[in-house]
Amino acid sequence: MNLSSWTGAAIAVAAVVLSSSVAIGGPRAATNMIVGELTSQPVGHYDFCQQYPAECSVRLPSSPSPELSEYGWAAIEAVNTSVNARIVPKTDRQMFGREELWAYPSSEGDCEDFALLKRRELANQGFSLADLLLTVVRKPDGEGHAVLTVRTADGDFVLDNLDSKVKAWNETAYVFVKRQSSSDTGRWVSIESARDVPVGSVR
């Protein structure tokens, strides 16, 4: 992990977050996703990038998944619990009268809004954006859904507004379709063995 991309207090926190493997009682049974080639960007994320171009123009050096400390695991769980408790779930249609509007929520939000806020709060605690990846999945009923994936040497973990528990990605019931690139915040990559999901996307 390249700590030179982090600034200020985040660097000091990162040394604790990523210093050593998580202790007994932390996450287990996880694996890392196998990602494929560049793929289409969800249309909601494309529009988000037009509004917040700095959010989608971060280039990150290639690096292995970081070791996750006990402190880091506690931070992941705390952020997931806190955001899920603070934000009231509402669809984009209910809030804005349109589909697929990705935004940082203040009190209400759709699934991708939860994921965006969790990503920002973990980044503020020292996690690299290379390891905080917005992810599109298919729910068991076939509906498209967005979650935040945290990439670690102990496996990839999912922060989900529909679940109070942080789970290994391979312990969920989802089909994983695509996620942000770990080297470019404006690009997306496919997830191996995933099928196309019927949500708006742009090439």
Image (spheres, rainbow, N blue to C red):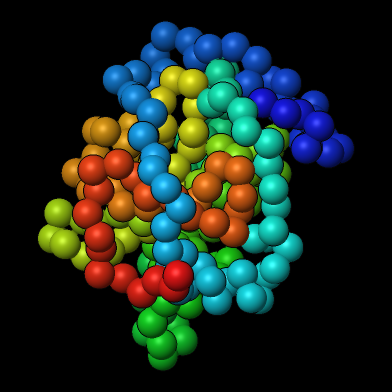
Q: Does any portion of residue 162 appear in the rendered image?
A: no
In this rendering, position of residue 77 left or right of residue 56: left
Give the percent coordinates (x, y) of residue 24.
42, 9
Residue 128, quarter of the rendered image: top right
**Residue nearest the viewer, comparing 91 with 51:** 51
Query: Which residue is found at the position 72% from the left and 28% from the top?
Result: 2
In the visual, does 45 lie left or right of 122?
A: left
**Residue in the picture at 49% in, 21% down:** 153
Q: Relative to 98, does residue 164 appear above or below in the rendering?
A: above
Q: Looking at the rendering, which quadrant does residue 183 occupy? A: top right
Question: Which residue is at 15% across, 54% downward?
Answer: 140
Name of the residue lying farthest toward the front: 37
Going by the picture, which residue comes out furthest to the bottom? 97
How far across and how far down the image is residue 146, in percent?
38, 58
Residue 86 pos. (x, y %) = 50, 58
Residue depicted at 61% across the width and 69% down the height: 49
Q: Position of 140 compared to 35: left or right?
A: left
Which of the pair 84/140 is nearer the observer?
140
Q: What is the x, y in percent for residue 101? A: 48, 77
Q: Quadrant of the N terminus?
A: top right
Outermost top residue: 24
**Position of the C terminus by quadrant:** bottom left
